[in-house]
Amino acid sequence: MSVLAQADLRLDAGPLDYALLVIYFAVVLGIGFMARRSVSSSLDFLLSGRSLPAWVTGLAFISANLGALELMGMTANGAQYGMATVHYYWIGAIPAMVFLGLVMMPFYYGSKVRSVPEFMRRRFGNAAHLVNAISFAVAQVLIAGINLYALAVIINALLGWPLPLSIVIAALVVLAYTTLGGLSAAIYNEVLQFFVIVAALAPLTIVGLIKVGGWQGLVDKVTNPEQLSSWPATDLTGISNPVWSVVGLVFGLGFVLSFGYWTTNFAEVQRAMSAKSMSAARRTPIIGAYPKALIPFVIIIPGIIAAVIIPELSALKAGDTSSGVRFNDVLPLLMRDLLPNGILGIAITGLLASFMAGVAANVSSFNTVFTYDLWQDYVKKDRPDEYYLRIGRLATVGACVLAIGTAFIAAALGGSNIMDYIQALFSFFNAPLFATFIVGMFWKRMTPTAGWVGLLAGTFTAITIYVLSEPTIGVRVIELPGQGASFLGAGLAFVVDVVVSVAVSLVTRPKPDSELVGLVYSLTPKKDRTHSATGEDAGWYRSPALLGGGVLALTTVLYIIFG
Amino acid sequence: MRLFDLRIIIAFLFGLYGVILVVTGLGFTSTEDIDKAAGVNINVWAGAAMVALSLAFTLWAWLRPLPLPTGEGKQD
């Protein structure tokens, strides 16, 4: 990212473009002010009072993930690896999202926990809870800082504002609306951001496609035909044997990494927990899965187009790095070369909106975990609710201040590598967490001790694989370029966590059944796991199972046509 | 807890954006700009699509207004 500023990415933004940007920020802050009027308790502030409709939480679910890493990273992957990038969306998200909605949400929403770590506490007790809550809170502050830094870099490159000023302004905007309106403001803005991001990317894709002569024109111009098919993705995984490459994709990315991320990351799950009913909560990730299945068309295709029509990028792809341009610069380059003033302003707005969505999701999930899981559980118990509402607001301010700090650390360390490390860090925690959750949800015998021992064993395994394969550390035992090492690390972490959890459970004492009702599948009465289908939850088109089946079918069809 | 209707906000923002873009595209986009965008007057088309989105959300909000609060909604 640091190189981004060196290449000439300055956009020719005019007064009209700035006006469109200002209108957007006015609306964003307006949402904060309006949402404030409906906040009267800590649950309103931190969990939207569990009152939101499914289409809102569903779009927010996607938007919270559509931040800096996603937009810059996936357009870059599109330019570099071509169609194989769709795996991150289709196999790497859709099945996990459907699984979250159909299988796991009844426990999350039905048990009335207010966060993912709180579920850990109810199921496994304090040791596992504390590990999970602290690691989540720390990770969110770090990632918020990196998102903030990425946001500032793009403001700096596009508009020329100094980096420190950009960081502080961006943090203040996020702080303003999340402190005022809490999660509701964050979620409402995420939905708005979703539409603005699409409004930014769709024209770019359409103009780009026309420029290369339509789909056929694009196919003719891509020099390496392998980049037009998504299987077996040997470039992406770094595994040269096609069979093992597919195994790595399906098990590593499609199962462990993606299920770990989508089903246990509270920044995502929180959106579903804020839904107004069990049915709406179950539909949240599934409704989000539809745009998730389609959005690669406006993210990856522009990447592929850019590699063909932007001279600097074609040169880079051929191995010539003299222009200073990097794959991360796809979107700014396309905007520079294709969009006239007017729509250019929308595109800049969309890019900034997307980056803010990422920061807001980090901040709004951090303050919930901090308030409920750390402060209320371990520091000051049994205070009146207004007290925790105030703590929630203070935690939001604290998170933004800390994020400004971590953003400057990210800036000092130089950007792009840190993002990769954070991705790796994430895989250390998510894959084992998913293993512990899934065993704990379906096997009542799993003990509290197994809960935290399994987590530590899994994390340790992932770190070991990382150390053995990371070139910069120097102990290069495993040769896996690309994403292969993190697929392998996550896969092994999952297996080790399951094995250790089972082994430890067999020699330690389980919780009595009575304490596990609502938390474990076999001990939860069917009526507590099913949702109502009356009133606002009535109608076949609101059936989570039907919607889930629909999006899986859609994804299969997309794979057949474009895979 | 009762929030305002987000659909109105979306309709407002994209209605405004759409009109601005269509006017810009028809009146203030040079041939040079149109050439840049592969010969398409993208401001007009994108603006028109935004106006359509705005109308769709308006229509949805109008046909299915938010339910009136009954008692205090749900137990929690």
Image (cartoon, rainbow, N blue to C red):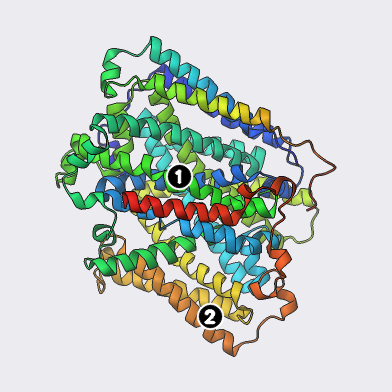
- Compare marks 2 and 1 and give the one earlier in the sequence: 1
Q: Indicate left or right for A324 with A56 as reference.
A: left
A282 on left or right of A71: right
Instruction: Please identify the quadrant where the N terminus of chain A is shown.
Output: top left
Query: Within the image, what quadrant is residue A238 found in?
Result: bottom left
- Residue labelled with disc 2: A501
Report the Cα–Cα distance between label 2 and label 1.
34 Å
Q: Quick check: can you spot residue A405?
A: no
Q: Tag 2: residue type? A: Ser
Q: Residue at x 69, y 48 (%)?
A: A538
For residue A85, above or below residue A71: below
Instruction: State the mark number for residue A67.
Output: 1
Residue A192 shows in the view: yes
Determine the residue located farthest toward the top in the rendered image. Answer: B27
Residue, far front: A540
Which residue is drawn at the image coordinates 38% and 36% (left, top)? A154
Assess disc 2: are there few (<14), some (14-19) or many (≥20) residues with their C-alpha within 10 Å of its C-alpha: many
Q: Residue A179 is drawn in which quadrant?
A: top right
Report the side of A64 relative to A470 (left or right): right
Instruction: Give the residue displayed 60% in from the left and 52% down from the top.
Output: A283
Residue A107 position, x and y percent, is: 65, 64
Amino acid carrying label 1: it is Gly
Label 1 crowd bin: few (<14), some (14–19), many (20+), radius 10 Å: many
Is A373 in front, or is A413?
A373
Q: Residue drawn 78% across and 35% down? A: B68
Under circle 1, the secondary element is loop
- Element assignment for label 2: helix
Rendered image: mark on residue B56: none
